[in-house]
Image (cartoon, rainbow, N blue to C red):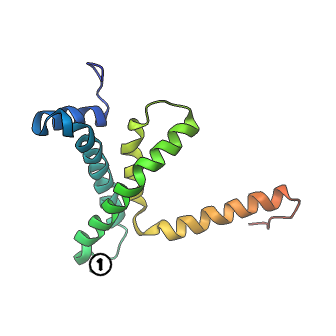
Amino acid sequence: MGANQLDPVSVAIALAGVLFGPALAGVIGPYAVIFISCTVGAGWALGRRDPAARLSAAWYFLRLNATAAVVTVGLAQLTGRWLGGDDNSWLLAPIALIVGGVGDDWPRLCRWLFMRWLRFFERRAGGDGGST
């Protein structure tokens, strides 16, 4: 880690190093960034929910943070490979933010992506692909 790295993961690792020691800082720092970013995104997503559902906000945040903890590192590695970079840690914050921001709309987003994927291959195979 260079002396002037100010990306969120490097800062979180430095802070975790002071609090927990260097042995744990490499694990705690990146996951702290994931949880903070996901919580910010989940706050945006919570604003889209109906007011009656706000009573379950703690469960909502817990569910989205658990999802982000499980998928963010893998998505960052896949995205980093696709972009051709060596260090994927800078992708943790934006990906966790997106995971939290999408919130409960993941099934709808996945259906939309799947339909776009089908239309793409339908057009490549010579079908009309629909006019939507």
Position of residue 17 in the picture relative to residue 45 (left or right): left
Indicate the position of residue 130 as horizontal and vertical percent values: 79, 68
How many numbered marks does the figure carry?
Answer: 1
Indicate the position of residue 86 as horizontal and vertical percent values: 48, 30
Position of residue 98 in the picture relative to residue 79 (left or right): left
Indicate the position of residue 7 as horizontal and vertical percent values: 32, 32
The kind of residue on which mark 1 rests is Ala
**The C terminus is located in which quarter?**
bottom right
**Foreground residue, 30 or 48?**
30
Work out which residue is located at the far left of the displayed protein and give it. Answer: 19
Work out which residue is located at the far right of the displayed protein and give it. Answer: 126
In the picture, residue 58 is in which quadrant?
A: bottom left
Rendered view: 67 above or below 72:
below
Question: Image point 39% across, 64% down: which residue?
Answer: 103
Question: Image point 28% across, 65% down: which residue?
Answer: 61
Question: Image point 80% across, 64% down: which residue?
Answer: 129
Position of residue 50 in the picture relative to residue 3 (left or right): right
Rendered view: 2 above or below 132:
above
Identify the element where label 1 is drawn: helix
Where does label 1 land, which residue?
Answer: 53
In the picture, residue 83 is in which quadrant?
A: top right
In the picture, residue 38 is in which quadrant?
A: bottom left
Question: Image point 40% across, 45% down: which residue?
Answer: 94
